[in-house]
Image (cartoon, grey):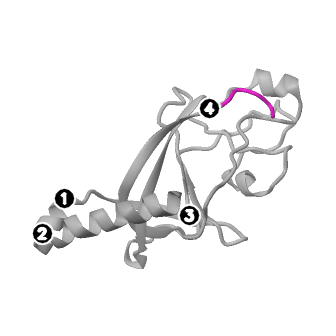
Amino acid sequence: MKRSILFSLFLLAAVLLAAMTPAQAADKVQWSVFQLTENAAGRLYQVSSVLVPDGKNKMGNFEAENMFDKKGTTCWCEGDPDDDEGAHIVLEVDEDTTSFHIINGMIVNEKLFKWNSRVSRFKAALYVAFRNAGKDEGGSKAFDAAKFDDESVSIKNSMM
């Protein structure tokens, strides 16, 4: 079902762009550049910030790599000292991906789950992206990306 919707969005965008001159089409598309880091398993990602441990916690680090380790004892945590608003994660997903799972919060135990903050609502956006090696910076891989669509999503506030 979702594939047909995404396919329809792509066809609609392609038809609309085909009806314009290349210059008109370029003016209509909002392009962004994403600098994505590649982990040891070949996953590409970007996060807005990372919480730097203060030396008091016993949980280790909160690096973005933790999002991919499939361990319930680690997590990524954004590190903006002012506000969580605007924190983001950009992930590359395979074109045949039909779903993915989000473990929201520190699920080591109920006390840590309740003590730490969690996302209650987020916006998921779908982009089409093309590799642009000419814009690579500092070991990251650059992609030119155009947004297809986004949708706000609510998350249930429970450990399971």
Disc on the earlier residue, 2 or 1: 2
Percent across and percent down for residue 158 are 76, 28
Disc on the earlier residue, 4 or 1: 1
The residue under label 3 is 92
Q: Residues within 10 Å of mark 1 (few under 14, many from 20)?
A: few
Q: What range of the chain is rendered magenta?
A: 156-160
**Do residues under tags 2 and 1 come within 8 Å of each other at their CB atoms?**
yes
Disc on the earlier residue, 4 or 3: 3
**Do residues under tags 4 and 3 come within 8 Å of each other at their CB atoms?**
no
Q: Is residue 34 visible?
A: no
**Who's the residue at 45% across and 55% down the image?**
126
Q: Is residue 159 left or right of residue 19?
A: right
Percent across and percent down for residue 117 are 68, 26
**Who's the residue at 51% across and 67% down the image?**
138
The disc placed on residue 20 is 2
The residue under label 1 is 28
The residue under label 4 is 119
Amino acid type at circle 4 is Val
Q: Closer to the camera, 101 or 106?
A: 101
Q: Is residue 15 above or below residue 9?
A: below
Percent across and percent down for residue 102 are 68, 45
